[in-house]
Image: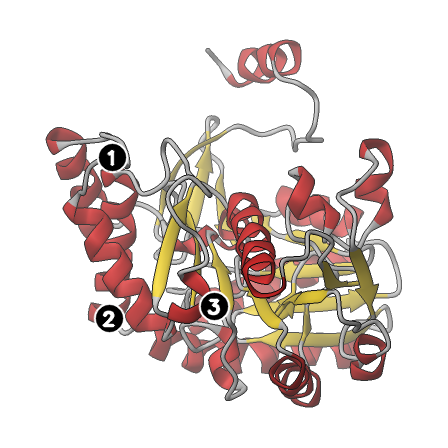
Amino acid sequence: MDTKQIIETAEEKLIHTYNRYQIVLDKGEGVRLYDTDGKEYLDFGAGIAVFALGYNNKEYNDAVKAQVDKLIHTSNYFYNEPAVMAASALTKASGMDRVFFTNSGTESVEGAIKLAKKYAYLKTGRTDSEIIAMEHSFHGRSMGALAVTGNKHYQEAFGPMIPGIKFAKYNNLESVKELVNDKTCAIIFETVQGEGGIYPASKEFIEGVRKLCDEKGILLILDEIQCGMGRTGTMFAFQQYGVKPDILTVAKALGCGVPIGAFLATENVAKALVPGDHGTTYGGNPLACAAAAKVFELFDKNKVLDNVKSVSKYLEDRLDELVNQYEFVSERRGLGLMQGLELTISPKDIIARALDNGLILFSAGTNVIRLVPPLVITEKDVDEMILKLKKSFEE
C-alpha cells in the first residue's frame, strides 16, 4: 500500500482514539526516522521516551532475532532464562528486591495498586484502604491506573472510579499531610511528572513524603515509567534524591520498543502477593525479557548514562537560549534528557510545523513542548534540533 492507502485504511479500520499526524513512519536509523515517502525526521520524541538506544541498533536487533528463533513464549508456569537475566539486571540497577513483569506501564501501575492494597489488608485486615495520588498526574488509562490519574478530563466518561483515591498537590507536602488518615495505605506520584507538564519533584517534597510514609507506615509508590531507565542521568530519577520507594513502576525504555513493563518492590512488601493474587499471560515472556536484558547490557557497554549527563547539560543551555530569545517561551524545566519548554501560546501549531521541518516533538500538559530524545543523541543533534525548532517558531 502507498501512504494514502495506509492512512485511509487506518481511518476506516482502527478505533479512532488517536488524532494521528498524516505521515506513515517506515524505518529508523540512529536518532532519525523515515516515512514511506522517504522524508527524514530528527526524532526528539523517541516513541514517547521509549527508544533510548536509538533505531536499528544491531546488537539489540540481533538479540531479539536470536530469541525469536529460540523461544518466544511459554507461560508463567515455567521458568525461562531471559526473565531471570532481566530481573537480575533490573533489581541491580534499581536497588529493589523483587520484580513482576508486565506488558505495559499501565499494567505496572495496576499491579502496584494491588500490591499496596494487599499489603495493607494483611497488615490491618481492612478492605477500605485509601491511596493518595497527585493532581495533574498521569499513570495510565486502565481503570485502576486511571483512578490515580489526577485529570478529570480522562476520567469523567468512565466513572465511577475505584473508591478511596484522594488527590494532593504535587510538590506541596502540606497538601499531602492534610489527606493522610488511618486508612491511607500508599502515596503514589511520578518522580518527574510527564504528561502534566515536565515537573521534577522538589527535594523537599520527595524527602518529606518518604519521611511521612516511614512515620505512618504508608507505602511510597514512585512511577518512573517515563522518567526511569536513564532518562534523567541516573538509571532511575529517585536515585538523585537519596530516597528509595517501597514500590516502583517501570516500562517504556525498559524494552526499547519491545512491549514490557514491571513493578518492583522491597522484599518485605513483595511477599504480600502469593500465588493466585496476580498474573499475566504474556508478562515476563522470553522475547520481551531478552530485549530488556540486552538493553541493560548495552546501557553499560555504551556508557549511555555518561552520554545523558554530558549532552543534557548542553541541551539545557541551548533551550535556555530560546527562553531568552523568544517572548512566548516562558520557562525550561526538567531533568536530564526529559525537558519541557513552557509556552504562553499553544504548542500544537509549532509541533505540526516542526514535523513539516523534519523534527518530531510531543507536547505535555496544555502548553509545554516535551523533548524526550533517544539517550544516544549528540551535541550535533541538539544543534540541528535547535535550528529546526527556531525555524518552526519563526514560521
The picture places residue 54, in percent across and down from the top left corner, at 37, 53
Quadrant housing residue 236: bottom left
Residue drawn at x 36%, y 57% as measured from the top left: 99
Quadrant housing residue 92: bottom left
Element under disc 1: loop
Q: Is residue 20 above or below residue 264?
A: above
Q: Which residue is mark 2?
A: 300
Q: Which residue is mark 1?
A: 77
The picture places residue 201, in percent across and down from the top left corner, at 67, 78
Q: Which residue is mark 3?
A: 231
Alpha carbons under labels 1 and 3: distance apart = 34 Å
Dot 1 crowding, Cα within 10 Å, few <14, some 14–19, many 20+: few
Residue drawn at x 46%, y 43% as measured from the top left: 277
Quadrant housing residue 122: bottom right
The picture places residue 48, in percent across and down from the top left corner, at 55, 50
Element under disc 2: helix
Dot 2 crowding, Cα within 10 Å, few <14, some 14–19, many 20+: few
Mark nearer the viewer, 1 or 3: 1
First of labels 1, 3 by sequence position: 1
What amino acid is labelled 3 in the image? Answer: Arg
What amino acid is labelled 2 in the image? Answer: Asp
Q: Is residue 304 visible?
A: no
The picture places residue 240, in percent across and down from the top left corner, at 50, 84
First of labels 2, 1 by sequence position: 1
Tag count:
3
Task: Please report contact status of discs 3 and 2: CB closer than 8 Å, yes or no.
Answer: no
Element under disc 3: loop
Q: Is residue 125 left or right of residue 47?
A: right
Residue drawn at x 65%, y 86% as measured from the top left: 215
